[in-house]
Amino acid sequence: MVKNTQIIFNKVPDAMPVVGEHIKLVTEDFDPNTVALSENDVLLRNLFMSVDPYMRGKMREAEAKSYSPAFTLGKVLDAGGVSEVIKSKNPEYKEGDIVQGLIGWENYTVVSEGKNLRKIDGARQSSIPLSYHLGVLGMPGMTAYAGLFKIGEPKQGETIFISAASGAVGQVVGQIAKIKGLRVVGAAGDDSKVKFLLDELKFDAAFNYKKMDLDEAFNKYCPKGIDVYFENVGGKMLDTVLKHCNDFARIPVCGMISQYNRTSNPEPIYNTHMILSKRIRVQGFIVAEIASEFRAQFAQEVPAWLKEGKLIYKEDVMDGIDNAPEAFLRILRGENFGKQVVKIADL
């Protein structure tokens, strides 16, 4: 008999979620040996789970439509995870396999029919951390790669600016852009994050957006203008960037985290006329819709860059499923440093 702690979606928040009100912890006794699996089901012992900004958008009423289905009230939240198969009625997966897929915010998850699981071959022998499959080798890495190449269309010698540049996606975008010969400029909200961008990721320039006037920062660090803006923030940042874009600039819109917990209307954008006058392309994207055309190229290049030391990846790891809600809130408050993951158990 073991304990299974679950994080339940309890109430729809209208601002920053509150633990105990909007999300709550429930712990129950759990005996894996007594779990009755249906045909093709798989029982997982969860090792790592990912928390990401998009999850805030899933904390809504079910009838409110979006690109991703809402969390279900009264049910366990879900997330990308890395897990060990401990019981299986699915011929594709055997006990001891390490898999990646959609799991619950919990210690143990039953995946019906093994849906959307992917085996991580050689996981036990690999020098690459398992958690990387939730970051640089997972959805955030693919988001960076596909968004940059599909919409950003980077060209050697151009200037790219990245907001939230030390985050799960931004740090990958910047390093790929450096590999491809661009001038890379990033913004972060903490001096230690700026130092990381400059000293470890080798960005050409970086600044703390909380300490500098944005116009002054762009005049100083992007003196020839911005050709690609990888958008993670929205609001005033986007509004100011439009003024500093070059003609025919491209803006892949990955996220707008500054707007997710506003209790009033979204911040206004005043410089939209420049989209026309400068012929700027502004395009939102959902990675699941474009990943397939980049999957083979991604699988070839990104692991090689990691092994060669051309690409490094910073994670912010919190221990214990009990701390998953706080890990999520840290993202929304901008307190995480790197890709936020929760370590649930050792392999």
Image (tube, rainbow, N blue to C red):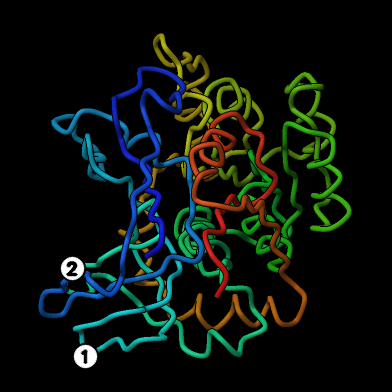
State the residue in front, 344 or 224: 344
What residue did someone put label 1 on? 91
For the residues bearing labels 1 and 2, Cβ distance under 8 angstroms: no
For the N terminus, the image quarter is bottom left
**Number of the label disc, if any, that sits on residue 112:** 2
Tell me where residue 254 appears, x and y as whole percent.
47, 44
Tell me where residue 240 appears, x and y as whole percent.
62, 23
| Few, some or many residues within 10 Å of mark 1 (<14, 14–19, 20+) | few
Quadrant housing residue 162: top right
Amino acid identity at mark 1? Pro
Residue drawn 25% across the image and 75% down it: 42
Amino acid identity at mark 2? Ser
Query: Looking at the image, is mark 1 or mark 2 earlier in the sequence?
Result: 1
Relative side of 324 to 60, left or right = right
Task: Give the vertical position of 45 relative to 127 (above or below).
Answer: above
Relative side of 311 to 82, left or right = right
| Few, some or many residues within 10 Å of mark 2 (<14, 14–19, 20+) | some
Could you tell me which secondary element the residue under label 2 belongs to?
helix
Tell me where residue 66 appears, x and y as whole percent.
24, 38
Task: Give the vertical position of 215 relative to 254 (above or below).
Answer: above
Relative side of 335 to 13, left or right = right
Could you tell me which secondary element the residue under label 1 belongs to?
loop
Quadrant housing residue 284: top left
Task: Give the vertical position of 194 relative to 3 (above or below).
Answer: above
Residue drawn 48% across the image and 46% down it: 52
State the residue in front, 240 or 3: 3
Residue furthest out toward the top: 264
- Cα gap from disc 1 to disc 2, whole angstroms: 13 Å
For the C terminus, the image quarter is bottom right
State the residue in front, 315 or 181: 315
Tell me where residue 96 appears, x and y as whole percent.
41, 86
Task: Give the vertical position of 326 relative to 263 (above or below).
Answer: below
